[in-house]
Amino acid sequence: MAAGPAAAGRVKGTYAFVSLGCPKNLVDSEKMLGSLAQDGYELVSEPAGADFVIVNTCGFIESSRAESRSVIQEMLDLKKSGGTKGVIVAGCLPERLEQDGGLLKQMPEIDHVVGVFGRDEIAKVADRLVGGSREQRELFRPAPIRALNDQSRLRITPQHYAYLKISEGCDRTCTFCSIPSMRGKHVTKPMEMILAEARELVEDGVRELILVAQDTTYYGMDLYGEVRLAQLLRELEKVEGLDWIRLMYLYPINFSDELISVIADSPVILPYLDMPLQHVNSAVLRRMQRRVDEKQTRELVQKLRERIPNVVLRTTFITGFPGETDAQFEDLKKFVEETRFERMGVFTYSLEPGTPAVRLDGHLPEEVKEARRDELMAMQQSIAFQHAERMIGYELDVIIDQELESGVYVGRSFADAPEIDSSVIVTGAELQPGDMVPVEIMEREDYDLVGMVSLEDEDGGDDE
């Protein structure tokens, strides 16, 4: 939850906001916050005492839906006790449940529901609530055929970094995934719109721009008839004041030689690639309908290692997909041990109603899925610790995110995305969030690095 100003003039009402889920959802949250500010609503930091509360939900997997329901119920309990007058629920959970009778059927105390693509009308929904309307409303809009504009956001992230959504929806047909049912088909945001948003963000203090989408490498196909991520990156490199560009959600298909060269040759695009692979065994990948096999996966990883200096690879895997045999899991373990991903997450297969994987045979017990996940993560811990130890003695550029205590700061190197990766604990200078400083790495604390600002930089704190 964050506080922020309303537009100049009379304040219509106060509200608190809870944003759940992925960075793509966070961009939607920030767009809603911007719309409400422009319409005269004041954001407050705590829901108790606010005129209303908005919860922007995640509906991706059951654990995400459970978290969303828990937060909604907490806000409804606050409303029941008189702590707020209304609760609006937005985002993926209402969209996910629309075909199952709707969220209002499950939680009838909610005042209004807004689907993913109703976000730009959030101020109208707030007007109804504040105006005293007691009629519950569900606002759903079809997935757009043109990309929505994400400018004029009120950002939740720290001033020095921001997420930039380059497309919406997904054309992939992965059998385990429900995202297309919530977010629709892939819709590319025009290059000029992205560049305008990037310049706006830099003017607002952003130094690190994190590109997100459901399928980043597919950028441009529907709009231009070809993938154009490489061209987009070349244009973003020219935006003055931008120090880092970080790439997330890179599907392994469409990773062209041109794209690899652009990343390898750039002083601004970080050699950090978030590329969810989900598995390596060809039979499992085929059942997942990932459209790549083991040979292609290994060749791509090898090419990225060879051609991009100091590349850091982040990936995710699913354990216990229907039909996954002991031998297929052993293939995955061998791949993880050989490839030694610097960053890796593992999820157990989540049975998602309405997805094709539900109809597959060979569904595994939860304890098997969890045991396999735990085994992979134990392997990865050792790999990650060894990688961190190899950084000791090196000097890394670190962007400062926050002050922990007097003279002690939390920052990130190029190898660390916000919220999901490790941190660098920094001492040795007076610093501010957003400062970028060279740090000599002295030791490792679990996954994190600990270092001191290099002596020659102690007088400035910032590299500009």
Image (cartoon, grey):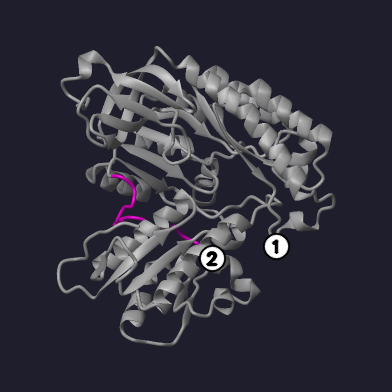
Q: Is residue 56 magenta?
A: no
How much space separates mark 1 and mark 2, taking CA atoms? 17 Å
The front one of 127 and 319 is 319
Residue 81 is left or right of residue 307, and the answer is left
Q: Is residue 369 visible?
A: yes
Q: Is residue 308 visible?
A: no
x and y percentages locating residue 78 in the rendered image: 40, 72
The front one of 340 and 381 is 381
* Magenta stretch prevailing secondary structure: loop
- Residue at 72 percent of width and 39 percent of height: 371
In this view, 357 is above or below 119: above
Residue 353's disc is 1
Helix, strand or loop at mark 2: helix
x and y percentages locating residue 43 in the rendered image: 28, 64
The front one of 426 and 344 is 426
Q: Is residue 147 magenta?
A: yes
Quarter-of-image position of residue 306: top right
x and y percentages locating residue 22 in the rendered image: 49, 50
Residue 69's disc is 2
In this view, 408 is above or below 13: above
- Residue at 59 percent of width and 23 percent of height: 383
User: Label 2 amino acid?
Assistant: Arg
Q: Quadrant of the C terminus?
A: top left
x and y percentages locating residue 1 in the rendered image: 35, 57
Q: Which residues are magenta?
A: 144-158
